[in-house]
Amino acid sequence: MNEITTTYTFRPRKSHGGIWSISFFVGSLLILGIPIIFLSVIGDPWFLVLIGILMGLLVLVLGITAHGYYSMKYILTKDSLILKWSVFRRRISLENIQSVASVTDPKLQGIRAFGVGIPGHLVGKFYIKIDGEFVPTTFYATNLENLVILRTLDGKIFGITPDAREKLLSSLASNQAFITMVEMDTELPLRATQEIINKARLWISVLLLICILMGVGTWIYTFFVYINLPDLIPLHWGISGLPDRFGNKYELLIFNSVFTGIDILLSTLIFWWLRKSDLGKIKLGITIMLFPLLITIVFSVLMIIISQLTLNYVF
């Protein structure tokens, strides 16, 4: 075995991830800038401060994301492979790498658990299907046509996309005899029993039904409140707890209808996607379906609180 005496730096393969990252950054500024300008006109300084803080945090996160794409690199030293993204570094000891697989024409099924999931810019923890199973994989990747999967002795999996993929692979193979070069299939059928599949699909359907029933139930509750309200009602409360804006009661119904529509549409789309994906055949699909349920609960509680506050003020 020959030691690596030179440090090699590999850039990720080019993609449209940088343009997408900058577009998200600018778009978010514009989207959040409009309500801030509006709030600055109508007052409510405490809410304006809160929105300003949230916008500042979002600008920081999106700024790091855009910088991360252009600063991403893979550094191969004599004893480690360093994955760099923005100000963050992940060091993988070469002695800890068990196998390396070059994935050609990857058609990945998976979902992001945490991190950046912009087209052409994938960084963080994802669950992807490899060899018939969905496994947690940490990505530092751009264009998946150059995907390389690294498995470590402690059970971790990493996905990188070096531009000079063959050079990186040959450097690892020629200098580290204990690293095994393997083939990896991202299109194998899912390894799951019919019992597991049926149970997952049943629970996903049940969660969709709960989302729809909660959304419709909240709308019905708001409607019964609506028919008992006078035409002019409070629509906004200031920091003192007193109403500072009044309007027609139909705005309450419109507000609730929009929330209910978004909730049911989101739940149905996620359900439809899970039914088309292998993710909907395992427990992970049930976990994913909990997301629209959480949104439904938040929307329902918010609408009930608003309706009850309005009702209590009027009567």
Image: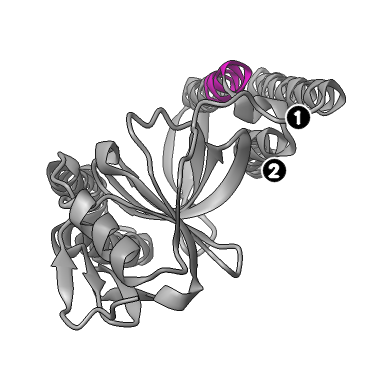
Queried whether the magenta region covers residue 271, the answer comes back as: yes
Q: Are marks 2 and 1 in contact (CB under 8 Å)?
A: no
Q: Which mark is residue 148?
A: none
Reply above or below: 118 against 138: above
Give the quarter of the figure containing the C terminus. top right
| SS class, disc 2 | helix
User: Would residue 136 be found to the left or right of residue 23 on screen?
Assistant: right
Q: Is residue 309 above or below residue 199?
A: below
Asked if residue 235 lies in the magenta stretch, the reply is no
Residue 45 on image: x %, y %: 31, 64
Q: Quadrant of residue 62?
A: bottom left
Mark 1 is surrounded, within 10 Å at the Cα level, by few (under 14), some (14 to 19) or many (20 or more) other residues, namely few
The disc label shown at residue 192, or none: 1
Q: CA distance from mark 2 to mark 1?
A: 53 Å
Specify the segment rendered in magenta: 264-276
Residue 103 percent across, percent down from the top left: 37, 39
- From the viewer's side, name the closer residue of 273 and 151: 151
Q: Which residue is mark 2?
A: 312
